[in-house]
Structures are given as C-alpha cells and as structure tokens.
Image: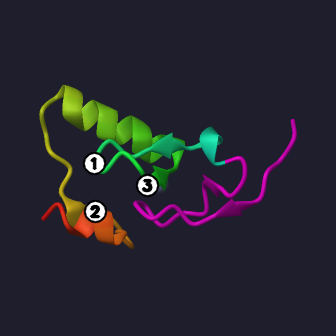
Amino acid sequence: MKSFPLTNCPRCGEKKLVVTPLALNCLSRRDNKTYICTRCGTEEALNDYSNTWNDVHDWVSPPPSIVALQ
Ligand SMILES: [Zn+2]
C-alpha cells in the first residue's frame, strides 16, 4: 500500500492527516472546509447522528473558521 506524507490533524492533534492528496481525509462537518483525519470525521458524523454536538473546544488547534462557530 502506498504511504502518503502525514501531518497533524487540527481536531485530535494526532499525525493522521494526509498532506496530499487532501481528498483522502474527511471534510469537517462544522465548517465544511477544514480537513480532519478520517477518525475525527467519523466521530463528527456519529455525534451528529446521536445529536451530541462535539464542542469546538475539543479541537486541539481549531482554525479561525471553527473558532468563529462559538
Ligand atoms: Zn483527527
């Protein structure tokens, strides 16, 4: 399996975000433009499904578009 360069996910902080191609990651459901790792994308989807809002404070390094949601 081909390996891709990774960087830190802005939500969980773990080195799981694919640098390129970005489409291999998940697009955050919060702002619809910030890429997060696939595990965080799954968590956001499950939080939405169970109607448990995952607060912005859970982000390790939230981008301005996420901070603006507070
Ligand atoms: Zn993550």
Viewer-nearest residue: 36 or 65? 65
Residue in the picture at 43% in, 61% down: 12
Colour basis: rainbow
Residue in the picture at 20% in, 50% down: 54
The quadrant in which residue 32 appears is: top left
Mark 1 lies within 8 Å of ligand 1 (Cβ measured): no
N-terminal of the pair, mark 2 or mark 3, is: 3
Number of the label disc, if any, that sits on residue 9: none
Q: In the displayed image of the protein, which residue is found farthest to the top? A: 49
Q: Which residues are magenta?
A: 1-21
Q: Are marks 2 and 3 in contact (CB under 8 Å)?
A: yes
N-terminal of the pair, mark 1 or mark 2, is: 1
Residue in the picture at 21% in, 26% down: 49
Structural distance between the alpha carbons of marks 2 and 3: 8 Å
Mark 2 lies within 8 Å of ligand 1 (Cβ measured): no
Quickly name the residue at label 3: 34
Residue in the picture at 83% in, 47% down: 3
Q: Are marks 3 and 1 in contact (CB under 8 Å)?
A: yes
Relative placement, left or right, of 22 versus 33 is right
Relative placement, left or right, of 14 versus 47 is right
Compared to residue 66, the image places residue 43 above or below, namely: above
Residue 24 x, y percent position in the rendering:
64, 40
Compared to residue 11, the image places residue 41 above or below, namely: above
Secondary structure of the residue carrying numbered label 1: loop
Viewer-nearest residue: 12 or 29? 29
Q: Residues within 10 Å of mark 2 (few under 14, many from 20)?
A: some
